[in-house]
Amino acid sequence: MRRKILIITVIAAAVMELIDTSIVNVALSYMSGNLGSTLEDTSWVITAYAIANVIIIPITSFLAAKLGRRNYYIGSVILFTLFSFLCGQATNIWMLVACRFMQGMGGGALLSVSAAIVYEQFPREKQNIASALFGVGIFVGPTIGPTLGGYITEHYSWPWIFYINIPIGLMVVVICLSILGEAPIRPVIGKIDWTGILLLAIGIASLQIVLERGQTDDWFSANYIVVLTVVAAFCLSFFVAWELRVQHPVVNLRVMKSRNLSVAALLTFVSGIGLYSSVYLTPVYAQRLLNFTPTGTGLLLLPGAILAIGGLLMSARLLQRGLSPVIMISAGMFLFMLFTWQMSRLDLDAGADNMYIPLIFRAIGLAIVTVPLSTLAVSSLAAKDIPQGTALNNMMRQLGGSFGIATVNTYLAHRNAVHRTDLVSHLGAGDPGVVQRLAGYTQFFTDKGATGFEAQRQALGLLEAGVLRQSNALSYGDAYLLLGIVFVIGLPFLLLTSRQKGKKPAIALADH
């Protein structure tokens, strides 16, 4: 019973952390109005959390070894919970951004260390079940985050999207203090690699800011984006060279000599693009263009999320029976490509019935990719290198999500402009259809009491709004296709994997 309670507790903590990656997305306008800030400044609430997560995740294994995993984990939960409370108490936007950064620093352990704890609760022959159980959180968190955030913001107030973490965090602390033990094996840590930590923090933070803020500030037309791009390139290049040379690196990049880990990390980056970009695109598309409510959007995503649980368990069992991870990854990527193709063909008359099946393909596809990718990542690693390998793999998923959302936003803006120009070029003043529609709009506004000139102006505005809405719909279709193309490009890299003859691959967690 203690084992089951511990498993449920740490999975709940991981789900809480993942929910917080997306729960604020639908509350930005409320925060902006309440704190008297611009929407651009308020979006730093998302950026700060993402930066902290990506900095801390690759060094969680080092921190757990240095501080003791039990102390580090419980301390991280306390840090996350405390700053969740302070986020709700923020009186200005920059106080909120600072608190979100510290919340993200605590959240890194809730993801990575929780997985290691779950992993240890199962014997080796059942570790595939542990991997599948933890994989549920990877899907549930990002999927329900926007819906939960929208419901809370609509019915209560935005601080409550942070306050709901407090009882969960306190519960996790109390239970872990009672029943969580130390890790069975605590690696010996030599001299602290402060240079590596500093280079990683500066490089990752700079890269994350470029990815998150580039589209908002028109990329390299902004001087600070240019400067941060140079800083990121220099620091990360120097970081790689330094970590390969130093005796006790904070991130052991030597494990990347494993071909399977390198391929898995690349494909995890691709799956991160698909996971986070699709969960970003779909709610926005449904709510802004198809007029779905936040609750309706949540119900739209729910069937796929439920079936994804079955997909995770199925993939774990198939791996246990000896099915090649390469075959399963290929099948999952194909299902995701089918999802992007079907979504790209939707129009403004689409309803929930048109989206359920594609979203189920998405969820099952990503579900049956998750566990095999984790298995592939560690299939040729020594036992002592597995924690570092899986930490790097997890970082690649987070980076893939940031890169994907930034790329999708840029691509949407570009394609929207292209489609608008194309649509306007077909709206000639002598076109009978255009003339008839404008006449109908003008008559409508005239009947409402507008003057002739005012009615014509409003009619033109309504026509322009229709053009913008249609161009937006077309650009979203293009964005879905772009995600599919990314998966097509990534698929051939599976041919580079190798499997040692006579050795059954280990089953590992997605996040360790």
Image: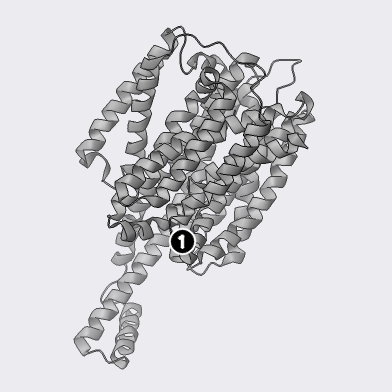
Q: Could you tell whether 187 is left or right of 2 in the image?
A: left
Q: Mark 1 points at which residue?
A: 153
Q: Residue at x 48, y 54 (%)?
A: 161
* Residue 269 appears in the figure: no
Give the position of the N terminus as an image quadrant: top right
Snapshot quadrant of residue 510: top right
Q: Residue at x 55, y 26 (%)?
A: 71
Q: Judge whether 320 appears above or below 158 on screen.
A: above
Q: Could you tell whether 327 is left or right of 405 in the image?
A: right
Residue 438 location (% of width, % of height): 31, 81
Residue type (three-letter) at the residue carrying disc 1: Thr
* Residue 186 appears in the figure: yes
Q: Which residue is drawn at 46% across and 41% down?
A: 82
Q: Judge whether 99 appears above or below 235 on screen.
A: below
Q: How crowded is mark 1: few (under 14 residues within 10 Å), some or many (20 or more)?
A: many
Name the residue nearer the viewer: 182 or 205. Answer: 182
